[in-house]
Image (spheres, rainbow, N blue to C red):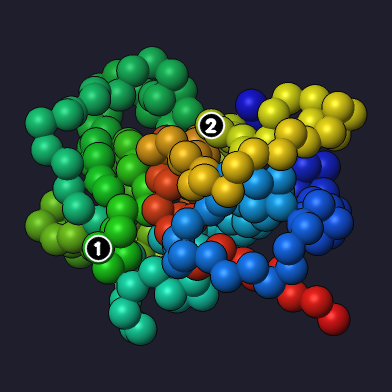
Amino acid sequence: MSLCPAKCIRIAALAAAAIVLSTQIAVAQEPSQWLNTPASRVEALAVLQTLNANLLSNASATFTLDRWCAAHKLAPEGSKIVAQRVGGQGKPADEHIRDLLTVGPGELIAYRRVRLVCGDRVLSEADNWYVPAKLTAEMNQALNTSDIAFGRAVQALNFTRTNLSAKLLWSPLSEGWDMDGLTAHETSSLGLPAFLLEHRAVLKLPDGTPFSALVESYTDKVLDFPVPRLLSQ
């Protein structure tokens, strides 16, 4: 399911709907347990759309996840996103990637697959094709030999981000819920799939030259925090 700006604008409305739908205000819930109730499912969608909007409006997913991790206390205070390299899964750049990066068949394109981790939680998995010739020697060294996240390694390039697509891989609300209503469920746990969002993007130098193509898949761990409480006034 593709996401559009209009969907993000509805976050406030969805959150308000959660209050209307809730029959038990400020119910105590187990930490990190999203209940399978209409109110909790609307809350989950509102939070997911908030993360999506944050990612779409910032150049660096790394720094967006830094802030998300800190704000939702997903790791000890001061933790930063690090990149766990995933070996043995090389994906040579195909014609589409080369077109996105505007490089010919003879120019080197490096590939890096990582898990972006904050504390002990994997928040996303990413495929990254980039042009080493567009980076400094120090940046290439850091990317080849350390667990630094790509956005942090190339921060000095003052890059911009062009979003190609944003897909909601899972929705806590059924298709047509806004016309047909929401079905009440027992207060069991709301099952989350492994991946919730997928973004595709190109990073560019200030002059518009592309140097990195990304496919980012965001995991269920981005919601691994105590469920928002609905408080009475």
Compared with 109, 141 (above or below) is: below
Residue position marked by numbered label 1 in the rendering: 120
Observer-nearest of 128 and 210: 128
Assess whether mark 1 and mark 2 are in contact (beta carbons under 8 angstroms). no
Compared with 51, 107 (above or below) is: above
Per the model, the C-alpha gap separating discs 2 and 1 is 23 Å
Residue 50, percent across and down?
65, 56
Marker disc for residue 169: 2
Q: Amino acid at mark 1?
A: Asp
Observer-nearest of 204 and 185: 185
Compared with 55, 104 (above or below) is: above
Question: Label 1: few (<14), some or many (≥20) within 10 Å?
Answer: few
Q: Quadrant of residue 87?
A: top left
Is residue 217 among the parts visible in the rendering? no
Report the side of 66 relative to 80 (left or right): right
Marker disc for residue 66: none
Task: Give the residue drawn at x 53%, y 31%.
Answer: 169
Task: Give the residue drawn at x 77%, y 36%.
Answer: 182
Report the side of 184 relative to 157 (left or right): right
Between discs 2 and 1, the one toward the N terminus: 1
Is residue 50 among the parts visible in the rendering? yes
Q: Amino acid at mark 2?
A: Leu
Task: Give the residue drawn at x 18%, y 28%.
Answer: 90
Which quadrant of the rendered structure holds the N terminus?
top right
Residue 181, percent across and down?
84, 33
Residue 163, percent across and down?
59, 41
* The residue positioned farthest toward the right in the image shown: 179
Observer-nearest of 115 and 71: 71
Which quadrant of the rendered structure holds the C terminus?
bottom right
Mark 2: secondary structure: loop
Report the side of 223 relative to 194 (left or right): right
Q: Quadrant of residue 54?
A: bottom right
